[in-house]
Image (cartoon, rainbow, N blue to C red):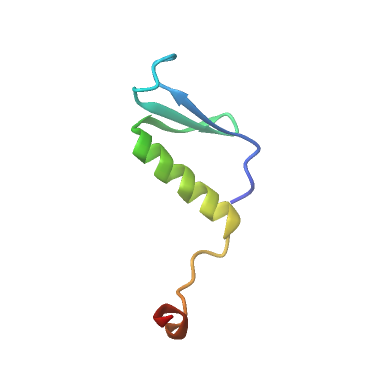
Amino acid sequence: MSVPAAILIEAQTPGDSSTLFRLRIDEKIVGENLTAAQTHLLIGEILERVALPEGRTALPAEKRRQ
């Protein structure tokens, strides 16, 4: 995944932050009618893919035990 130029979170109903949200990346809508928790999770996944493009790797057994 390439680094996005912009990540925008919009309230579905402008001015009402207690409503559902829309998520845009580089002007493309990637999610609509998302709860705050869903939006938070999706942004985390996107940023993780940008930061770690090779994917997650399991920790060696020695590191897990520490």
The number of discs equals 0
In the rendered image, residue 18, in percent from the top left (x then y), is placed at 34, 23
Farthest-out residue, front: 66
In the rendered image, residue 37, in percent from the top left (x then y), is placed at 35, 39
What residue lies at 66% left-to-right and 37% top-to-bottom?
A: 5
Q: Is residue 57 above or below residue 34?
A: below
What residue lies at 47% left-to-right and 80% top-to-bottom?
A: 63
What residue lies at 42% left-to-right and 41% top-to-bottom?
A: 40
Q: Is residue 7 above or below residue 62?
A: above
In the rendered image, residue 14, in percent from the top left (x then y), is placed at 44, 14
Q: Is residue 62 above or below residue 21?
A: below
What residue lies at 47% left-to-right and 48% top-to-bottom?
A: 44
Q: Relative to 24, is 3 on the left or the right? A: right
Q: Quadrant of the C terminus?
A: bottom left
In the rendered image, residue 52, in percent from the top left (x then y), is placed at 57, 60
Within the image, what quadrant is residue 53 found in? bottom right
